């Protein structure tokens, strides 16, 4: 008698990953570098505690945000010069400039700015990560600070054309200028590649980047560990 239906396994070539869901009350500490957790923005690098030149094999896996389409369809069509931004309305371009300026202001923030922007538990975890030389985790909290600081920036708050998105486990950008998707991330090659794989990102023009936080930067902020 033939066997009954066999349950497919990974050996059959199934590669689809389940959708991430976080039960209520789950710890909000970032534990998956390279992905968004429940409270943070996109991570800027893999959790590589060795040298920065080494590649984290796990980072090449499919992100839960890959292949997803942002509601509302494509952000824009390229203009004649090939730029999507130059084809946007004046209001949308002004909103992108507001976001760009807010990112720059946040990147130049002091340790007091970071402490006042993050929640008390977040800042304490960031401090412990620095003390423990978990520099990749410090960068995750710094990315969370940047995104929160931009959302709280007065010029961004006053811009009725900017929408804050970036909800956890949603295939959506951090912000929208009109209908143009904007993600905020570091200026590293790894981060750029990771974001360009996301279905709602059309090109590098959708990315507002900031200088990666270096270890000397951390020491300047926190002092010697």
Image (tube, helix red, strand yellow):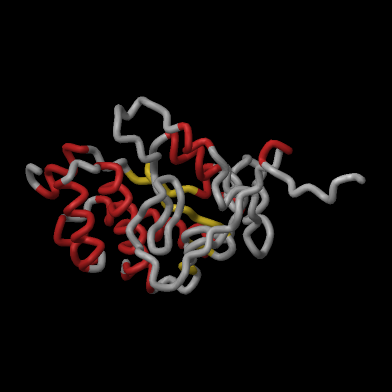
Residue 142 horizontal side relative to residue 164, left or right: left
| Residue 204 picture location, percent across and down | 52, 42
| Residue 22 picture location, percent across and down | 47, 65
Please report the residue visible at 57 percent of the width from the left and 48 percent of the height from the top.
Answer: 198
Please report the residue visible at 54 percent of the width from the left and 39 percent of the height from the top.
Answer: 61
Given the current orientation, which residue lies at the most extreme left position? Answer: 224
Rendered view: 45 above or below 151: above
Given the current orientation, which residue lies at the most extreme right position? Answer: 1
Q: How many marks?
A: 0
User: Where does the C terminus fall, quadrant-wise?
Assistant: top left
Q: Quadrant of residue 36?
A: bottom left
| Residue 161 picture location, percent across and down | 50, 70
**Residue nearer the viewer, 159 or 168:** 168
| Residue 21 picture location, percent across and down | 52, 63
Please report the residue visible at 34 percent of the width from the left and 35 percent of the height from the top.
Answer: 48
Residue 186 horizontal side relative to residue 15, left or right: left
Rendered view: 203 above or below 30: above
Residue 90 horizontal side relative to residue 10, left or right: left
**Residue nearer the viewer, 103 or 133:** 133
Rendered view: 62 above or below 28: above
């Amino acid at each position: 008698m033939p066997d009954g239906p066999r349950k497919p396994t990974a050996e059959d070539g199934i590669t689809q990953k389940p959708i991430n869901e976080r039960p209520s009350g789950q710890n909000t500490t970032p534990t998956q570098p390279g992905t968004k957790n429940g409270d943070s923005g996109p991570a800027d690098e893999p959790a590589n505690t060795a040298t920065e030149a080494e590649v984290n094999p796990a980072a090449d896996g499919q992100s839960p945000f890959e292949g997803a389409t942002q509601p509302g369809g494509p952000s824009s069509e390229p203009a004649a010069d090939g730029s999507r931004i130059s084809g946007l309305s004046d209001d949308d371009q002004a909103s992108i400039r507001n976001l760009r300026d807010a990112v720059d202001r946040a990147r130049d923030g002091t340790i007091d700015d970071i402490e006042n922007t993050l929640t008390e538990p977040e800042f304490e975890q960031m401090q412990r990560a620095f003390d423990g030389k978990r520099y990749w985790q410090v960068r995750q909290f710094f990315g969370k600070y940047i995104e929160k600081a931009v959302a709280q920036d007065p010029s961004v708050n006053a811009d009725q054309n900017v929408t804050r998105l970036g909800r956890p486990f949603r295939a959506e950008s951090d912000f929208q200028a009109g209908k143009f998707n904007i993600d905020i991330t570091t200026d590293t090659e790894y981060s750029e590649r990771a974001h360009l794989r996301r279905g709602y990102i059309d090109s590098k023009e959708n990315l507002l980047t900031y200088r990666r936080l270096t270890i000397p930067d951390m020491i300047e902020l926190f002092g010697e560990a």
